[in-house]
Amino acid sequence: MAVTDEQIAFVRDLFRDVPGVTTRKMFGGLGIYSEGTIFALIGPGDAIMVKARGDLADQLAAEGAEQWTTYEGKTVNMPYWILPDAALDDPDEACRWARLSIEQNAS
C-alpha cells in the first residue's frame, strides 16, 4: 500500500485544527504528528488510527472503534485504534480524538 497525495490532503484537512500537523511516509503507511508527537497513522487497509491506551482506548472502544490487532496475517498488539466512523465525517470530532491522543502521548 502506498499512501496517496489525496490521502495526505484528507488527513491534513481532517486534523486542520490540530497544531503543527506534519506527516511522514513510512513502511507503506503514514505517520501523523502534532509538533513532533505522533498521534495517528494511516495503516493497513487505509484506516486512519489514533494512538491510545488505558482510559482513552476504553473511550474509543465504547464509540465502536477497533484496535489494530493484525498485520500481514499476524497478531500484533499495537496501541492504535481506528477512528470511529463519525470522526471521519466530522473534523471537530476527529480533532477532539487527536487532542486526547496528543495529550496522552506527549507525557
Image (tube, grey):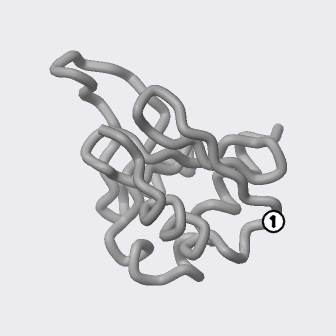
Residue type marked 1: Pro
Front residue of 4/43: it is 4
Residue at (36% x, 41% y) in the render: 2
Residue at (24% x, 27% y) in the render: 70
Q: Is residue 57 above or below residue 10?
A: above
Give residue 59's position: percent from left, percent from top.
47, 58
Q: Is residue 74 left or right of residue 98?
A: left
Please identify the quarter of the rendering in which residue 52 is found.
top right
Q: In which quadrant will I find the C terminus?
A: top right
Q: Is residue 81 above or below residue 13?
A: above
Give residue 55's position: percent from left, percent from top.
56, 48
Front residue of 6/32: it is 6
Q: In which quadrant will I find the N terminus?
A: top left
Residue at (52% x, 31% y) in the render: 26
* Residue furthest top in the image: 74
Give residue 43's position: percent from left, percent from top.
38, 41
Please identify the quarter of the rendering in which residue 65 is found.
bottom left
Mark 1, secondary structure of its residue: loop
Residue that mark 1 sits on: 19
Q: Is residue 100 above or below residue 36?
A: below
Give residue 3's position: percent from left, percent from top.
41, 47
